[in-house]
Image: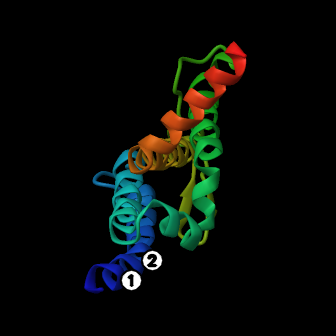
Amino acid sequence: MVLRVVARLLLGPSIMVAAALIVKGYTDVGDGFAAGMVVALAIALCYVAFGATDAERLLPPLRYSPHCAVGGLLLSLAVGFFPMLFNAPLFSHEPGPGERVTTFGSLELFTPLIFDLGIFLLVVGVMTVLLHQMAEPDAHAADTADDGREKES
């Protein structure tokens, strides 16, 4: 009972810590991987506390984990390879040194932030898919076994 209460209460603060890590991280650029792991660990605690079925029922966004992982991968790759279209090196930071940076409040919007968001989405998506597969390995094995029998018939 205590674990269930803690798991529910820990998810919100973990998202806030992840946002802080993405914005400033351990250095000035940000840390999308650490932010993704913080949220993935909070989701893992929900899986342990509630079981796979109840955790996925309580957290409906978990069903979009594969899409989250693919979207994060594509976003990170786009940020990394987009400068090549303008004959710039891979992972060039835009805006460059000395150029004006667009701000949203006190948050500076530049390419490393977008890259960190992509890495965050990739890590959370992949870790959640792995948690789902580890939580119900028999259900996945039964589905593939049923598919194999239908093809043989």
Q: Mark 2: give few (<14), some (14-19) or many (20+) Cα within 10 Å.
A: few
Which quadrant, please, contains the N terminus? Answer: bottom left
Regarding residue 65, the answer to whether it shows in the image is: yes
Q: Please name whichever residue, 9 or 84, is drawn nearer the observer in this view of the structure.
A: 9
Tag 2, which secondary structure? helix
- Give the x, y percent position of residue 106: 53, 69
Residue 47 occupies which quadrant of the picture? bottom left
47 above or below 99?
below
**Which residue occupies 62% across, 66% down?**
60
Q: Please name whichever residue, 112 or 98, is drawn nearer the observer in this view of the structure.
A: 112
Horizontal side, residue 92 vs residue 74: left or right:
left
Horizontal side, residue 28 vs residue 148: left or right:
left
What's the distance in space between the residues labelled 1 and 2, CA to CA?
7 Å
- Give the x, y percent position of residue 100: 61, 50
Residue 25 occupies which quadrant of the picture? bottom left
Total number of numbered discs in the rendering: 2
Whether the residues at callouts 1 and 2 have beta carbons within 8 Å, the answer is yes
Question: Identity of the amino acid at label 2?
Answer: Gly
Residue 89 occupies which quadrant of the picture? top right
Regarding residue 29, the answer to whether it shows in the image is: no
Q: Which residue is mark 1?
A: 9
140 above or below 135?
above
**Which residue occupies 38% across, 70% down?**
14
In the image, which disc is placed on residue 93?
none
47 above or below 86?
below
Tag 1, which secondary structure? helix
- Give the x, y percent position of residue 150: 70, 23
**Which residue occupies 73% across, 16% down?**
153
In the image, which disc is placed on residue 12?
2
**Which residue occupies 58% across, 69% down?**
57
> Which residue is situated farthest in the front direction here?
153
